[in-house]
Image (cartoon, helix red, strand yellow):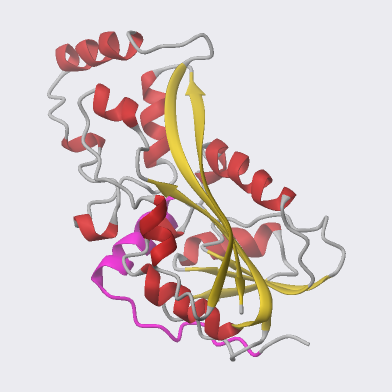
Amino acid sequence: MRPEVVSDGVKHNMKASIVAERFSAAATTYAQHNSLQKMSAQKLLNEMAPSGVLLDIGCGPGTDFSDFTHLDNVIALDIAQGMLEQVSSQFPSYQILCADAKAIPLPANTVDAVYSNLALQWCDDLKQSFSSTASVLKSGGDYHLAMVAEGSLPELTALGFRANAFRGLSDIVSQFDPEVWLIKVAKLEANTVYFDDLKALLYSIKGVGASINADASASNLSQSVSNQGIRGRGDWLKLLEKAESIRQEKGLPLTYQIARLHIEKR
């Protein structure tokens, strides 16, 4: 039985609105630049065996859950309406829900499993998000989660760009109320993606809506590519030369530290 879904019931604050706008704008090109997301998604999916109702938090353009034959319903939640339009196009059987992960407008105890892939690093209040998730997840339900974590994107620093620090694994774990959640797996994995040239590397960040300006508490990328003082062809050529100094056999690397968690609601 499908839980009653209330869309458009959440008032976004200014930061959430910026995130929504940027990711909506990237929705149509997201699939061209989301190799990291696909890599991470496959690892999460390999560790799951959901049934009943599955909630995908920060669904982006959608994930294919068709291999899980015991699923009755997928609820795709995202703050960006543009992403949900892509979901409706690609996965018409999914229910879409435009909402903030900090205030999930679903009835209590109506979701059997939760999935979230590389979305919640943009959330400025993880504790509230996890509390909201716990309210809709049934007791014994599994939550499979991947987030970009501390130590990511060292290559950007080497090239002279500036990125805020992401949350560390211990910080992420500490946001779960131990009286509500049981941490079954919490690990950190390095994932490197490679690009033919610098333009492709930089666009991989901007193309997924990630180059947003936010305060440090949000643990987001800060100071986007356009803010780095590239004033003309000379500056660009110097940057290209610097990029070639970090090139590896597979191409120009961009490394992410990914926190992977499997949590169960008590």
Residue 9 vertical position relative to residue 196 in the rendered view, above or below: below
What residue is rendered at 68% in x and 75% in y?
Answer: 141
The magenta region covers: 4-26
Q: Magenta stretch containing residue 60, yes or no?
A: no
**Which one is nearer the viewer's eye here, 101 or 209?**
101
Q: Quadrant of the C terminus?
A: bottom right
Residue 79 vertical position relative to residue 61 in the rendered view, above or below: below
Q: Quadrant of the N terminus?
A: bottom right
Position in image of residue 139 (x %, y %): 66, 83
Q: Is residue 239 visible?
A: yes
Residue 72 vertical position relative to residue 147 in the rendered view, above or below: below
What residue is rendered at 26% in x and 22% in y?
Answer: 158
Position in image of residue 91 (x %, y %): 71, 61
**Which one is nearer the viewer's eye here, 227 or 222?**
222
Position in image of residue 100 (x %, y %): 43, 74
**Which one is nearer the viewer's eye here, 208 or 106?**
106
**Which one is nearer the viewer's eye here, 177 or 156?**
177
Viewed as shown, does residue 257 lie left or right of 32?
left
Residue 229 vertical position relative to residue 175 in the rendered view, above or below: above
Q: Is residue 99 visible?
A: no
What residue is rendered at 41% in x and 59% in y?
Answer: 172
